[in-house]
Amino acid sequence: MTRNLTRAVALAACVVVPLVVALAVLGGIGSFATLRRLAEPWFGPQAWIVPIGIDLGILALLAWDLLMEFADLPWPVLRWIAWTFITATVILNISAAHGDPIAGLMHAAMPVLFVTVIEGIRHLIRRWVGLATGTRRERVPLSRWLLAPVSSFMLWRRMVLWNVTSYPRGLQLEYLHLEAVSALHQAHGRWLWRWKAPLSERTAVRLQLAGAAFPTPQIPQQQDSDDQLIQAAQAIVARAEQRGVRLSQMDLAAQLRAQGHRIANERLRWLATAIGLRRESV
């Protein structure tokens, strides 16, 4: 599935990229004459530098912005500056239309199309990177917003504050929150619980949400199972009895650890009792 999706995106990119470049070139050509004419009083024969420099700057800013989005390091300042220059060029071109609405619309058409396509590409990159890194926050369904706008806003707010990216996970947190708050309602009143409930109980609500949002990873088992330890210890004791050697608890622990078993010193007495080993000093 992922491979097919990657191929589809690559194919779409091969089709879209030339179209975007062509749209940018046509838009630059369309505004070139207007901007050059407006810049001639200040730049003279070098007035052609102004429209070309602005267009190249816009392309550089947008390309760098898309690259930052792909690297999951977005910096919106690049996009804002590019939009500012695009808006300025559109305004200058519209002013050159001398109040003709049709001419002004034609001047604004290609820049608007270009910005729309770039924003669509940025949206795709954001979703793609979010899926790959697990940082894309799932949206609260529109139907829920319509049926329960207040609780939907609280759910969305909680997902943002607790950095929850999964909508089902957000619903689980919402359920835990409602369950904890309902208990406080019953104990202290529907509206007065925020003031009457002890600080420890109010803090427990947040701690419960924190525990659910950031579950503690399972610590790997450091001790071997009891059955394995008992079997290994019995085998060691049996071999020692065959040789006529009497083992102490520390001797037994040393041989167990030499075989790769893990056992804490405080469990030696329990193990000795389990296998019938008499405790002796080292």
Image (tube, rainbow, N blue to C red):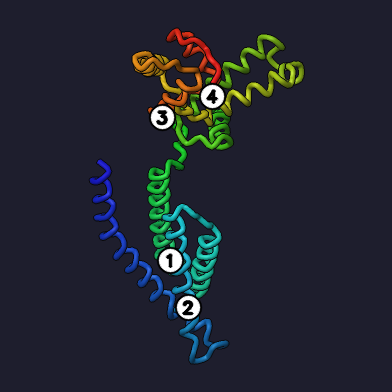
- Residue at 51%, 17% (x, y): give it: 268
Q: Is residue 74 above or below residue 264?
A: below
- Sequence-earlier tag: 4 or 2: 2
Q: Is residue 231 visible?
A: no
From the top left corner, tell me how far across and down residue 146 is, in percent: 49, 29
Q: Nearer the viewer, mark 2 or mark 3?
A: 3
Mark 4 packing: few (<14 Cα in 10 Å), some, or many (20+)? Answer: many
Q: Is residue 12 above or below residue 101?
A: above
From the top left corner, tell me how far across and down residue 159 is, in percent: 53, 33
Q: Nearer the viewer, mark 4 or mark 3?
A: 3
Quadrant containing the C terminus in the rendered view: top right
Mark 1 packing: few (<14 Cα in 10 Å), some, or many (20+)? Answer: few
Mark 1 secondary-structure assignment: helix
Give the distance between the C-alpha atoms of the residues marked 4 and 3, in whole angstroms.
Answer: 51 Å
Quadrant containing the N terminus in the rendered view: top left
Going by the numbered disc 1, the residue's amino acid type is: Ile
Disc number placed over residue 157 in the picture, else none: none
Of 244 and 253, the residue lying toward us: 244
- Residue at 39%, 70% (x, y): give it: 27
Task: List the residue tagged with mark 3.
Answer: 258
Q: Nearer the viewer, mark 1 or mark 4?
A: 4
Query: Cβ–Cβ below 8 Å for labels 1 and 2?
Result: no
Q: Nearer the viewer, mark 3 or mark 1?
A: 3
Task: List the residue tagged with mark 2.
Answer: 53
Residue furthest to the bottom: 45
Give the distance between the C-alpha atoms of the residues marked 1 and 4, in whole angstroms.
Answer: 53 Å
Mark 2 secondary-structure assignment: helix
Going by the numbered disc 3, the residue's amino acid type is: Ala
